[in-house]
Amino acid sequence: MKPADPLHCPLCAESKIEHFHSDKQRDYFLCSTCALVFVPPAQQLDLQQQKAVYDHHQNDVHDQGYRKFLSRLAIPLSARLLPGASGLDFGCGPGPALSLMLKEQGFPTALYDPIYADYPEVLQDRYDFISCTEVAEHFTAPGLEFSRLFSMIKPKGILAIMTKRVIDRQAFAQWHYKIDPTHVCFFSDKTFLWLADRFRYQIEFIDRDVVILSRS
């Protein structure tokens, strides 16, 4: 299926878009410039529909399995922070375990989530680090969101992202990650390299789903 109207990439705004995959629920398109794979706006859920899905997530801040999962980002992030660094957990969700884990390591962490922690005042500050765990795939306007995130990071600051990455078309066709109806943007190594170049950050691929962007 091809789009009825021309699509523009929600990350880089380019119009060089090709069909990437379709399933019974949605279509997926690939940007030829930044390699973002995305669901067209007409097939995305609205905010209330998204919340109905999120409310079923079980993210207990004291659940050891959940904390172990988040530690794959928390440990490398903490290792790169100077003593006293403070940050923001952007898209913290209803169970902000990561912020608690970082606070336990001596890094005070503010919270923001458009549904569960809508404190717009924290978006006016600047931070030594921003964490974004299992959030980027939900961005309906990733270009705007990343511009905002980078604008809130202090010089020599860090943006730490956790999201599973696209490998290729064949793997995507069998990928469970795309089944979640709230997942609308999918990033590959190439996408993150484009992002690092766009905002002039250094990039480290820490794990299969952890990326750290920093300025030395």
Image (cartoon, helix red, strand yellow):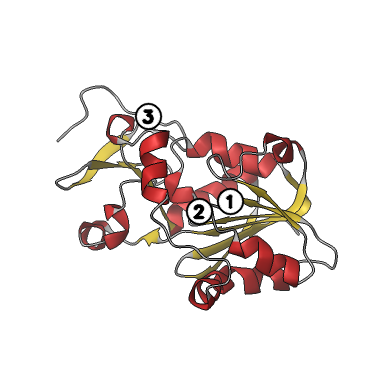
Q: 136 left or right of 183?
A: right
User: Which amino acid lies under the numbered mark 2 shown in the image of this protein?
Assistant: Phe
Q: Quadrant of residue 152?
A: top right
What residue is rendered at 46% in x and 59% in y? 163
Q: Are marks 3 and 2 in contact (CB under 8 Å)?
A: no
Mark 2, other Cα within 10 Å: few <14 / some 14–19 / many ≥20: many
Vertical arrangement, residue 205 with respect to residue 68, above or below: above
Q: 71 left or right of 122?
A: left
Q: Do the residues labelled 1 and 2 touch (CB within 8 Å)?
A: yes
Question: Nearer the N terminus, badge 3 or badge 2?
Answer: 3
Q: Name the residue under label 3.
A: 8
Q: Is mark 2 on a helix, strand or loop?
A: helix
Task: Quarter of the image for the C terminus: give it.
Answer: bottom right
Q: Position of residue 61 (x, y in %)?
A: 57, 66
The answer to which of 97 and 11 lies nearer the viewer is 97
User: Which amino acid lies under the numbered mark 3 shown in the image of this protein?
Assistant: His
Q: 63 left or right of 124?
A: left
Q: 35 left or right of 72?
A: left
Residue 16 is at least partly visible in this image: yes
Q: Where is residue 91 in the image (x, y as percent from the top left)?
A: 56, 49
Vertical arrangement, residue 3 with respect to residue 79, above or below: above
Q: Using the image, tell me which numbered label, if any, was put on residue 72.
A: none
Task: Quarter of the image for the N terminus: give it.
Answer: top left
Q: Mark 1 points at which residue?
A: 196
Q: What element carries label 3?
A: loop
